[in-house]
């Protein structure tokens, strides 16, 4: 469902041009100062998923509030913990959509969509199949065998849609490490166990700059808006206060999980500490811009599926 792509990244507070024939217009979301990409040619599909309340401004443009209504369905194909197992997302008509490309990133007011790949307290290494059509969620493999973490992950783990860590971009603030060619990862610290493929509304709280075999692999720490303690945490300092030890536990878990397989520990940039919310939002903006270049084919896609 490429029609959703781009048009679905409108935030609840966005400045839109009145008329645009530019197929790659930018939308600036003033509530938190982020800019996301929009394709006006896909506007018709977006209207099925948004309602708008627009107020004309004195200067050129509108202030529009958009409420996303995805009505996403989850469809499993095959048997779990087999090579054939896939989890697809479907729109309300039953058509397959891509969790990476077709779910909007930004919902506005600091709220983002998060797609769960690995439920908390599980060990099967599930991930979006970035090289398959519609990028379903599958269990990762190595040498033809299903992969498992050596121990359960203690948080819900997944991705931010419409983001991409560009493998040609050397991050100047993280030892010049190159992106890992995947969507941005999220560690959701709420108490409820998510389902594979479930779409949750989350707010970012901070970011860890993991370096995995020389590649930059961001971990955005976030919390579901439905969590009972969500209102208490808005930045990394709040996490330390209300979820004591959690940031250290996340860093240590991702640092050490490869050691049982005989590999070295992962490293972390930014002084080995979690960056604050402002920095996390900067990471999200940068990787959304990289994704926009990818789907416009401004950069090579390689084996990645854009379907």
Image (cartoon, rainbow, N blue to C red):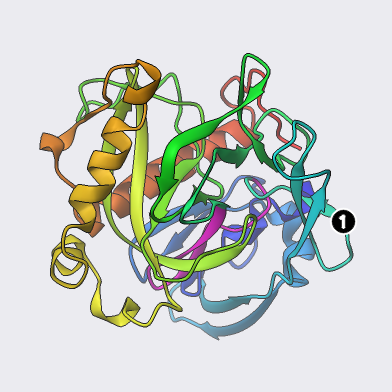
**Quick check: 61 above or below 286?**
below
Left or right: where 55 falls relative to 86: left
Q: Position of residue 243 (x, y in %)?
A: 22, 67
Q: Measuring 61% from the left and 45% from the top, which residue is drawn there?
A: 24
Image quadrant in which you'd find residue 52:
bottom right
**Residue 112 within the magenta-colored segment of the rendering:** yes
Q: Measuring 65% from the left and 22% from the top, which residue is drawn there?
A: 145
Q: Measuring 56% from the left and 50% from the top, which residue is drawn there?
A: 161
What residue is disc 1 on?
95
Q: Is residue 16 visible?
A: no
Q: Position of residue 186 (x, y in %)?
A: 42, 50
**Quick check: 263 above or below 135?**
above
Using a 10 Å C-alpha cutoff, classify the residue at mark 1 as few (fewer than 14 neighbours), some (14 to 19) or many (20 or more).
few
Q: Position of residue 169 (x, y in %)?
A: 38, 23
Q: What span is in magenta?
A: 101-116
**Quick check: 160 above or below 143?**
below
Q: Nearer the viewer, residue 229 or 234?
A: 229
Q: Measuring 36% from the left and 24% from the top, which residue is drawn there?
A: 260
Left or right: where 5 falls relative to 178: right
SS at badge 1: loop
**Residue 95 within the magenta-colored segment of the rendering:** no
Q: How many marks?
A: 1
């Amino acid at each position: 469902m490429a029609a959703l792509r781009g048009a679905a990244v409108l935030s609840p507070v966005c400045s839109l041009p009145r008329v645009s024939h530019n197929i790659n217009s930018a939308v600036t979301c003033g509530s938190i100062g982020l800019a996301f990409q929009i394709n006006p040619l896909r506007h018709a599909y977006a209207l099925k998923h948004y309602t708008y309340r627009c107020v004309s401004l004195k200067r050129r443009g509108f202030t529009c509030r958009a409420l996303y209504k995805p009505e996403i369905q989850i469809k499993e194909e095959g048997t779990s913990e087999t090579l054939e197992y896939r989890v697809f997302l479907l729109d309300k008509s039953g058509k397959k959509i891509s969790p990476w490309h077709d779910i909007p990133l930004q919902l506005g007011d600091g709220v983002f969509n998060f797609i769960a790949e690995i439920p908390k307290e599980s060990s099967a290494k599930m991930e979006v199949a970035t090289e398959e059509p519609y990028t379903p969620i599958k269990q990762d493999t190595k040498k033809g065998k299903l992969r498992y973490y050596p121990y359960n992950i203690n948080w819900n783990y997944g991705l931010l849609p419409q983001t991409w860590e560009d493998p040609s971009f050397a991050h100047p603030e993280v030892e010049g490490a190159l992106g890992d060619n995947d969507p941005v990862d999220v560690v959701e610290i709420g108490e409820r166990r998510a389902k594979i493929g479930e779409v949750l509304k989350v707010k970012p709280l901070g970011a860890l700059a993991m370096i995995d075999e020389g590649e930059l692999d961001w971990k955005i720490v976030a919390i579901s808006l439905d969590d009972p303690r969500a209102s208490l945490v808005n930045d990394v300092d709040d996490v330390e206060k209300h979820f004591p030890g959690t940031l250290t536990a996340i860093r240590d878990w991702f640092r050490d999980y490869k050691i049982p397989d005989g590999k070295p520990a992962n490293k972390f940039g930014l002084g080995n500490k979690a960056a604050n919310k402002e920095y996390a939002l900067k990471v999200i903006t940068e990787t959304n811009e990289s994704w926009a270049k990818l789907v416009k084919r401004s950069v090579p896609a390689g084996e990645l599926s854009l379907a």
